[in-house]
Amino acid sequence: MKTSKSETILSTLIAKGNLYGSGAEGIKAQNIVVSNQNDWDTLITKMNSVNTVTSGFSEVEIDFSVFDVVAVFGEVKGSGGFSLDLNMTKNSENIVVAIKQNAPDRLSNSVMTQPFYIVKVRKSDLPIIFTKTNE
């Protein structure tokens, strides 16, 4: 049995935070890979449908001939303080996106939030798989 060595993938953080539309954005908890401008425009429009979230993004102009966007959305929560972290590695077979869901460490405000995490990565022929982690 061969073991495949993992290495960390360089990614550029586009945005990490929360949507505050109580789910009205219509974005379900999901992990997506955006590989073209049309899908990116659709996602941005949805994210901005309640509040202009993308004004805080580090970039919105993506060169999809070179990069893909990995976007992770958590569940809509009944209070604030929730967040996501991503760790991306690759081996000879896959790119693995390990998702850590962070809960608030103390009582938080009672506003409905939906955590998200969006990064840009270099395009690859390897399939991207998502896993959940507690680390």
Image (tube, grey):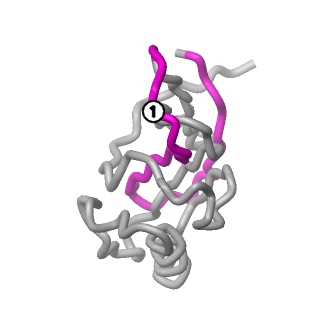
Can residue 119 be seen by looking at this rendering?
Answer: yes
Give the residue drawn at x 48%, y 19%: 107
Residue drawn at (34%, 72%) of the image: 62
Viewer can see residue 83: no
Q: Is residue 110 magenta?
A: yes
Which kind of residue does numbered mark 1 sit on? Asn
Q: Which residues are magenta?
A: 105-134
Measuring from the top left, give residue 131's x and y in whole percent: 66, 33
Q: Secondary structure at mark 1?
A: loop
For this view, does 17 lie left or right of residue 28?
Answer: left
The residue at 30%/50% (across/down) is 12
Q: Quadrant of the N terminus?
A: top right
Residue 75 point in image, percent of width and height: 65, 44
Q: Is residue 35 left or right of residue 9?
A: right
Horizontal and vertical percent for residue 127? Answer: 64, 52
Residue ID for mark 1:
109
